[in-house]
Image: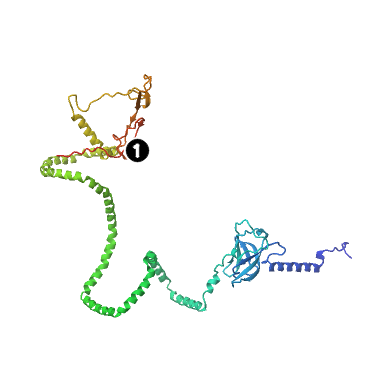
Amino acid sequence: MNPTGRKPTGGLVASPVLVGGVTVLVAIIAVFLSYNANSGLPFVPTFDMTVNVPSSAGLVKGNEVRVGGQRVGTVTKITAVAHPNGAVSAKLKLALDKSMQKIPRDSTLRVRPKSALGLKYVELTTGKSASDYPSNSTTPLSASSKRAVEIDDFFNMFDEPTRVASGENLNEYGDAFAGRGPALNRTLAKLDPLVRQLEPAMRNLSSRRTGFDRFFPALLQAADEAAPVAEIQATMFVGLDGTFEALEGVSKDIQATISGGPPALDTATRELPAQRPFLAANEELFRRFRPSFASLSAAAPDLSEAFRLGIPALRGAPSLNRRFTRSFETLERFGEDPRVPSGLRRLARTADLAGPPVSFITPAQTTCNYLSLLFRNTQSALSESDAVGSMLRVLPMSVAQLPGSEFGPAAVPANGPWFDPNNNANTLRKDSFLHSNPYPNTAAPGQTRECEAGNEPYAQRRKVIGNAPGNQGTANQPTKRTLR
């Protein structure tokens, strides 16, 4: 009897046989799924397609298919394909995820190694074509990249004798280098300057312009040409023996010359770099002298005239120098006066302040000759005279009394033609245009290099205020006068 008074209930856990059967079934399903994991899970829809590749290159069934490094499918079947021309390629059947249903027709495939141990995978690089591959389609062989060189291909190029010799070399080099690490380090450190200097030399040597590829053929040709005269060359060496015997008598002098060569070279190596700044300074000096030398050719006639006139003056210079003695004594007392330094400082300050104006005014004379023209014109105006007076006189000038004219004060610059209002026919026409250039260019710093004052062209029938259009050049009237 049941002490609780309840009837026994049936269920799944009440039967040990049923529980064991379910457990075995679950284990079988887990093993089946693990075994077929590389081929994809069962009952999962896939996008199948077949691709042609030049070579399966060590692929096996179940290898991954990746896009951008992400697994998107597996290789389910590998088949070799023989072509009529004797070539052999491989056909791979791929089971891709449903997310890869749209594969452009310009996509490419390549078999690549997954690790150095030989595991491979198929790399799919999607294209940009608007047309896609349908399900169960086959890609052409041209869609697969050429087979890349693998690491096993690299090692397979060494045959057995090569591998044995490489092992012997490794063993012998190991014995040779054992315990010589510091010496090798010093050697490599000292090779660095050699390699740095050797690189440009080898670059020049390997250049096509050197013709180094013709060097050894030329040596061969020279040897072929020297072979017929071998006996003559032997005789020459016999003659050289006599020459060297003669040189033996002066060998000490030659030795002294050779011994003195290195110190001389050391001195040159030490001193020549110190002379380089001096040579560079000389180069800069003569470069700056170049415009002066070019100006000497133009100044040669004036210098020649000055030298011709200066010779008589120099003949009288000794007597003049004797008379300068008192002046130099006075100048000495002036230099010893304690008030002079203060005055010189003020004079230097004055010169500093006058420097910019002088540099601005200087081109007016050195380039445009205005100062000499001023003195010449002033002298000419005061020297030529008649019964009335000198050339410097004031003449009345009739100016039209028009709006803006210079006859009197004006609100605007004169600019225009004006018709006489008293003329009924309106044919009498008077022009009044202001032409004023208060600051003409005189080739000063910051200005156009031209001598504009006195050279401005007169622009008819239009007002011009300021600089005239265009460059008037630097040509001006010369004021050279021959001294007699």
Which residue sits furthest right? 1
Q: Quadrant of residue 353?
A: top left
User: Can residue 447 be seen from the camera position used here?
Assistant: no
| Kind of residue at badge 1 | Gly
Residue 172, position as x, y percentages in the image: 45, 77
Task: Report the residue marked by disc 1.
Answer: 470
Residue 303, position as x, y percentages in the image: 19, 45
SS at mark 1? loop
Depth check: 443 or 471 in front? 471
Q: Is residue 366 above or below residue 393?
A: below
Residue 325, position as x, y percentages in the image: 12, 42
- Indicate the quadrant containing the C terminus: top left, top right, bottom left or bottom right: top left
Depth check: 193 or 419 in front? 419
User: Can residue 265 be seen from the camera position used here?
Assistant: yes
- Looking at the image, residue 18 sits to the left or right of residue 351; the answer is right
- Looking at the image, residue 201 sits to the left or right of residue 172; the answer is left
